Amino acid sequence: IMVSLAQGSQLGIQRPEIGADHHAHQIDGRQDSADDQGCNAHGAIPRAGLRRGICILTQHKRLSIQTDLLRHDPRILRDMQAASLLPAYLLHDRHDLRIILVQHDIRAGLLPDTVDKFLDFICDVGNDLQIYGSRLYAVINCSNKIEVMDAKTTKRIGQIDVPNCRYLCFHGQYGYITSYAGPVSLDASHAQIGYVARFDTATLEITGTCLVGYQPDELVIVGNKMYVANSGGYMVPNYENTLSVINITTFTEEKRIPVAINLHRVRLDKNGLLWVTSRGDYYDVPAKLYCVDPKTDQVIDELDIAVSNLDIVGDSLYACATAWNYVTMENSVLYSIVDINTHKVVCDNFITDGTDQNIKKPYGIKVHPLTRDIYLTDAKNYVTPGTLYCFAPDGTMRWSVRTGDIPAHFAFLEMPRELSLNGEK
């Protein structure tokens, strides 16, 4: 299978070589052979194999088809046909965004069709990507806007202007976006406080703002409360150290919860607990992961692991980290799995086949909720094309493909059970 650039050069989807002596291994409590994994002894694709496509927003050039192979398992086929939850989009942190939309028929044995789409709007620094209802929202940080598109056709619907916008969440008819408010500027005396803007998802009009801490990043809603991670990232070394708690009904900040300095991510798990990341100060204060109980608004646990990005699926928190330290002048690279029930690190490296030695700077991570395939991006040196990897649940690489600069943010698109491809259901 080849991947081609619009300007004529070619890229290949790299898949690990599978020899005739490829051993069977344990998956989901049973022994699966190489054939069961979606490839035969020579690495060829069986006619019965199920394919799943990925849509990618890239910088500079268009990428064509990118597919991953699911093992031919009737249970997975059944789940996919019932839910039809498919990987959809990958947003880069750089500008000039393009989308390649790969549509597929979920019936086993049929190859996917490819639709190449180009977004001709100018963008600078993609910072978040989410699908809510029938719309796709792309946060373009340094262009001070949220681009709104139809999630299935990527047709542009409009934009929402928000200065130095950061991260999105949704509740009911409204969307919420954090904003640093001021320009991009590292300044210890920076006095521009951040805020959360509320917009109507039907009209795309801003309907209110709520002041929070300095340089707010991720936010999440629990019941009638919104939690916002304040970083103070522009105010080095005077970082913020709190979560703002906002009442959704009144849209006012009720209080702040002290957690740790330089907060970044905040995610909700299935147990109703919040997982909050701190980036530390890059010197003596290490990056850590914290657990906050929204019932008491108290920190109930902390883990001594760095987390740059994470995804929570089922009982597991999957994390990758590139933690820089100015004392050692080195990055600490981690690929961890945390059990959200025991709050213990159960895996120090979820990549089991040595592929991690080829990854320079793990950046974005997303785990498929049905198959548990792990999608991981490598930003490399931040100025040259990165790489998107797909790993099986056992940590072995399924494939990798070159992307645009700084591949970072994912969104899954839930498709109807019956897909129409070229007029054929």
Image (tube, rainbow, N blue to C red):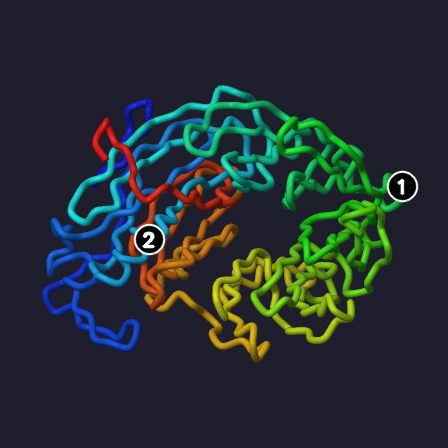
Give the camera-side residue of 81 and 355.
81
Q: Which of marks 1 and 2 is in front?
A: 2
Please tell me whether residue 311 is drawn above or below residue 107 in the rendered image: below
Give the camera-side residue of 325 and 155.
155
Please tell me whether residue 321 is drawn above or below residue 81 in the rendered image: below
Q: Which residue is drawn at 76% across and 49% down?
A: 248
Which residue is the site of mark 2? 82
Type of the residue with mark 1? Ala
Real-space Cα separation, disc 1 to disc 2, in angstroms? 51 Å
What crowding class fits label 2: few (fewer than 14 Cα within 10 Å), some (14-19), or many (20 or more)?
few
Type of the residue with mark 2? Ala
Picture coordinates of residue 349, whole percent (x, y) = 45, 69
Q: Is residue 233 left or right of residue 8?
A: right
Please tell me whether residue 105 is drawn above or below residue 120 in the rendered image: below
Q: Quadrant of the C terminus?
A: top left
Give the camera-side residue of 67 and 235.
67
Q: Is residue 297 left or right of residue 68?
A: right
Which residue is the site of mark 1? 191
Label 2 element class: helix
Q: In this view, does 198 lie to the left or right of 35?
A: right
Picture coordinates of residue 247, whole percent (x, y) = 80, 52
Q: Residue at x 37, y 47 (%)?
A: 86
Earlier sequence position, callout 1 versus callout 2: 2
Give the camera-side residue of 50 and 284.
50
Picture coordinates of residue 102, whole percent (x, y) = 32, 36
What crowding class fits label 1: few (fewer than 14 Cα within 10 Å), some (14-19), or many (20 or more)?
few
Q: Quadrant of the N terminus?
A: top left
Picture coordinates of residue 326, whole percent (x, y) = 69, 58
Please tell me whether residue 116 is drawn above or below residue 226 in the rendered image: above
Label 1 element class: loop
Q: Which residue lies furthest to the top in this view?
A: 120
Residue 164 is labelled as: none
